Image: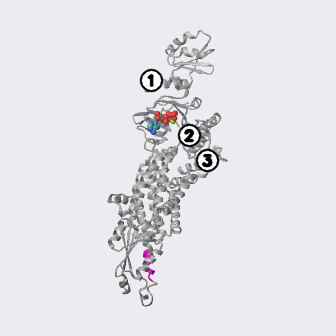
Amino acid sequence: MSVQQPITNHESLVTPDFAIDVRGVTKKFGARTVVNDIAMQVRPGEIYGFLGPNGSGKTTFLRMLCGLLKPDAGSGHCLGLDFRRESAEIKKRVGYMTQRFSFYEDLTIEENLDFIARLYAMPQRKLAVEKSLERLGMVERRTQLAGTLSGGWKQRLALAACLIHEPQLLLLDEPTAGVDPKARRDFWEEIHKLAAAGLTFLITTHYMDEASRCHRLGYIAYGNLLAHGTVDEVVKTAGLTTWEVSGENLSALADKIRGLPGVEQVVAFGTTLHVSGRDAEKLRASVAPFMSGAHGWTIIESGLEDVFISLMETAKDNFS
Amino acid sequence: MSFNLQRFWAVVVKEFIQMRRDRLTFGMMVGIPMIQLILFGYAINSNPKHLPTAVYAADNSPFARTIVWALRNSSYFDITREAHSTAEIKTMLAEGEVQFAVTVPVDFSRKLLRGEKPSLLLETDATDPAAVGFATAAINELTFFVLNHDLTGPLAKLRGTSPPFNLIAHQHYNPESITQYNIVPGLIGVMLTMTMIIITGLAITRERERGTMENLLSTPVHPGEVIIGKIIPYIMVGYVQVTLVLLAAKFLFDVPFMGSVPLLVALTFLFIVANLAVGITFSTIAKNQLQAVQMAFFFFLPSLLLSGYMFPFRGMPGWAQDIGECLPLTHFLRIVRGILLKGNGLAECASDLWPIALFVAVALAIAVKRYRQTLD
Ligand SMILES: Nc1ncnc2c1ncn2[C@@H]1O[C@H](COP(=O)(O)OP(=O)(O)OP(=O)(O)O)[C@@H](O)[C@H]1O
Ligand SMILES: [Mg+2]
């Protein structure tokens, strides 16, 4: 939906065109570089999906944005404030939902919300808590201890709590992990509604269906941002060719194809097989001998998952 | 970095709720003083009676016999030996055969009759000072009335507001005596040190261990607001404990309340804050709750041993006294004993107040500095 901005545009440094506008962000733990020279621009009202394998540095990046970790390098702005020097101000305007449930299990739902509302010095605290309980659908269960909530409900409470001070930017770290499909759909409906109202979201997720519901995506592996843009852009720039194979005995076929030059991924998708590689010619040459058989071969558009796995494989070669 | 009252209050309210929900810890906060009271008050510092006593009656007059008879009746003394010389008494005490030795000097009755107030010598083996305090007090009291029956007729004028003879108590081996009156008021300090440091030691490490710290840090709350907000509820717990011990001191142990209780309560505030500051400092340093508890014990042991609670302060070697002077408990013990037993006022307490105040300032400064506003 949005036109991509060149990330080296220094004019954007002070313009409030971006809710997040950072570059060169780097974090090291000891000798290990966990986040390496990442640049990111997110427009107000945008839902930015942040994807990447486990341990790729997503949580670390979010923590740096809201002042929980000190970056080793990098500059830029968050909601028009210097993200390295003005983190106290940024904290007031950002809602951060941690990956691990981090509310007080020995406080009730209402007490947790009330505590957070007090910390943000909300002028109409009681009202804000009440509204939040209503939105959560937890008015009747307000006196339940947070520790006794199911996993999905804990996630919902956490989201409600980080919305209570009406932040402009939300950093959500795997907000839907362990949440059932219906609740996940409701959650995304809510996110889109809020985004339409002007809130900006940076959301990490491991779900492909959620990735495709984001306005734009960033893919990080080994601390490096490997791809970013809209879903289509990401798929296109990856330059992946994917063949869909249908027919009998697909697993025997998969064993034969795997490892041939140009064949990077062979993945079973239900009753079909996806065979993909970045070098279209090499791939065609390798699989051509198998096309004569009983199987049907068609070129399809690569999926996000194929693209991400391909990106990750390449990154493994380059960075690790 | 401005201190925001609302955020501070948020932390206070939260801590109170959590304290209420945590039944075990809450029970501990009331249970620990009770256990300490029983252990220190009854078991360890019992009020020993029937202590072996030697008598050397150089003057075998009726007066001397009355005194010996009264000693026997007091139940504190068992006259187990009769000595015939000063040297004999010395060996008996040295060898621990007797705890006490009473000497009635040669010219006791002659001087008494002349109204010259002769001396009665009481020598004690005070290596276990707790053992002799009561007995000494008992014999001291005897001097006022023991001879009343003998001083009749023309001698009645010798009875009066002051005893007809002087008791010269001579404590051997240990100049500073500790009585039960000493132990129970001191218990206020020991107990506050132990519970306050452990409980607050857990306060911040718990947030870190449960992952709630990450959330807390992502909000605008400042270190000072968190730390002071966490301290307040425990100050109140501290006062509950103080009240318990003071009630026990008064009604179970009959400790005299010579000075002003409100003054004691007021000065206790500073001491509670000192301990909370230590606990909070520990919890900013410790990586987990276990470490915090270990650190609390690391601080508690020297406090117990070197403050003058367990052993007489002046009986300790110089280096131990130097360490003791740095501990808030040492000064608090002097304050609490001074107020309750000696009836001291604020002026007499001042010299022990400023060291505690200094301690608080240093500990809080470390705590606020150590409280990390980031996760790394
Ligand atoms: N405080 C820390 N000290 C040392 N290493 C750390 C620290 N925090 C994170 N790391 C390391 O940094 C790397 C990135 O971690 P991070 O949590 O950012 O990954 P992630 O992308 O969020 O992964 P996941 O999808 O599993 O949540 C990991 O290898 C992790 O072990
Ligand atoms: Mg993570």
Q: Quadrant of residue A300?
A: top right
**Residue located 58% across and 15% down the image:** A252
Q: Amino acid at mark 3?
A: Leu
Q: Is residue B143 visible?
A: no
On screen, residue A75 above or below A280? below
Q: Residues within 10 Å of mark 2 (few under 14, many from 20)?
A: many
Of residue B253 and residue B7, the one placed in the foreground of this image is B253
Rendered image coloring scheme: one colour
* Percent of width and height locating residue B214: 50, 43
**Chain of the residue where label 2 is placed in the rendered structure:** A
* For marks 3 and 1 on the same chain, the one whose residue lies earlier in the sequence: 3
Chain part drawn in magenta: B139-147
Magenta-colored segment: predominant secondary structure: helix
- The mark closer to the camera, 3 or 1, is 3
Q: Share a chain, discs 2 and 3?
A: yes
Of residue B315 and residue B343, the one placed in the foreground of this image is B315
Of residue B139 and residue A232, the one placed in the foreground of this image is B139
Residue named by callout 1 = A317
On screen, residue B339 above or below A37? below
Residue named by callout 3 = A145
Q: Is residue B372 left or right of residue A97?
A: left
- Secondary structure at numbered mark 3: loop
Q: Are marks 2 and 3 in contact (CB under 8 Å)?
A: no
Residue named by callout 2 = A199
Q: Amino acid at mark 1?
A: Asp
